[in-house]
Image (spheres, helix red, strand yellow):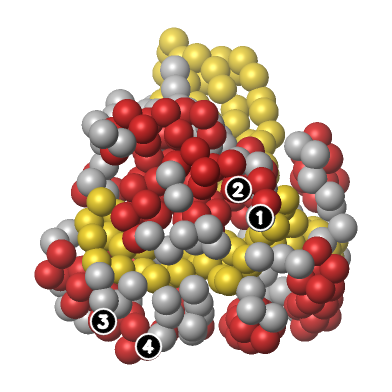
Amino acid sequence: MNIEQIVTAFQQLKIAVVGDVMIDRYITGSIDRISPEAPVPVLNFMDEENRLGGAANVALNLKALGAEVHLCSVIGSDDAGKDFIGLLDDAGFHTGSIISSKDRLTTIKTRVLASSQHLLRVDREQKHDINDKDSSNLLELIRTLIHERQIDLILFQDYNKGVLTESLIKDLLKLADENQVLTTVDPKKKNFWAFEKASLFKPNLSEIQAQIPFEIRPTIEDLNKADRYLRDRLSHGISLITLSEHGAYVSDGVNSYICPTQARDIVDVCGAGDSVISIASLVLPLTQDLEQIGLLANLAGGQVCEQVGVIPIQKDLLVNEFIKNYVN
């Protein structure tokens, strides 16, 4: 399939995104003096904006690219949770797979910026695992989605905030396998080794280095060695390892490549990983061409780094960049 056919086919896909959701809050202003009370800058407030964050940003990316998306998560039954539901409504999402729990706080990440520069981030969150009742309800919601909406793929977006417990991960992977649904994973430290037999596993280099007992440089030899170590533990399908400025490594256990990045004016790396897993999750059901997966994921991650804040992928720009750089 060529790039135009792949992107057009995104509209046929039905994706369930499961993981930690949050509000990304941006407070912007200007600085022209230092506080007389302490040696810190004084921000002259200009604006405050709430955006969908975490797994919700991944869902926003998938929706922007044309897929039917079902966001599945647990939020708090608090004012921030109401704000989050309002953001979902504004973005055109159904909210039936979002569970409101009295046992949780809705996560808010507040970023303070001046002249596009990050000054401070404040996190309001809870990291303990969701309770058994919420976990069971979330599993049943996803089971219903698979059967009623014929879900093509479950995307696990883990930020270690407690929604993806080890038992829920295993139950969902079993459910996906029983129903021949593909699975893609963007892991974090806590449950890194719980995602056995996923269709695609996407850590970054630092995340792998924290889990593997030998040095990994961004070379094909080191990455192939790391890939073999991962496969011995996870028995997964495709490895997609993001390497920051060195590109992305992709392997199916037989063939492997390092897909280089394009030169960029990097402004903000927030949301780059979300974009990578979003594109990989859409391309995987359509083609398992490793180079296409790696190159498209690279472009998507780089594209969002050229703008401030967590933003969705621009489909037309993605297609145009791919044709410009990789089509003769």
How far apart are the alpha carbons under marks 1 and 4?
A: 30 Å
Q: Report helix, strand or loop for mark 4.
A: helix
User: Separation of disc 1 and disc 2 at Cα?
Assistant: 6 Å
Disc 1 residue type? Answer: Leu
> Residue 94: image x %, image y %?
84, 50
Residue under label 1, please give it. Answer: 13
Query: Tags 1 and 2 in contact by the CB under 8 Å rule?
Result: yes
Residue 326 x %, y %: 29, 38
Residues tagged 3 and 4 counted as in contact (Cβ below 8 A): no
Tag 1 and tag 4, C-beta contact below 8 Å: no
Three-letter code for the amino acid on which mark 2 is drawn:
Phe
How many residues crowd around disc 2 within 10 Å: few (fewer than 14), some, or many (20 or more)?
many
Tell me the distance, in whole angstroms, between the alpha carbons under discs 3 and 1: 31 Å
Residue at which label 4 appears: 233
Residue 49 percent across, percent down from the top left: 67, 28
Residue 301 in view (yes/no):
no
Label 3 sits on residue: 228
Disc 3 vs disc 1: which is toward the camera? 1
Res 279 label: none
When the figure is inspected, residue 49 is found, relative to residue 257, above or below; the finding is above
| Left or right side of 55 for 73 | right
Q: Quadrant of residue 224?
A: bottom left
User: Residues under labels 3 and 4: Cα distance?
Assistant: 9 Å
* Mark 2: secondary structure: helix
Q: Along the polypeptide, which appears first: circle 2 or circle 3?
A: 2
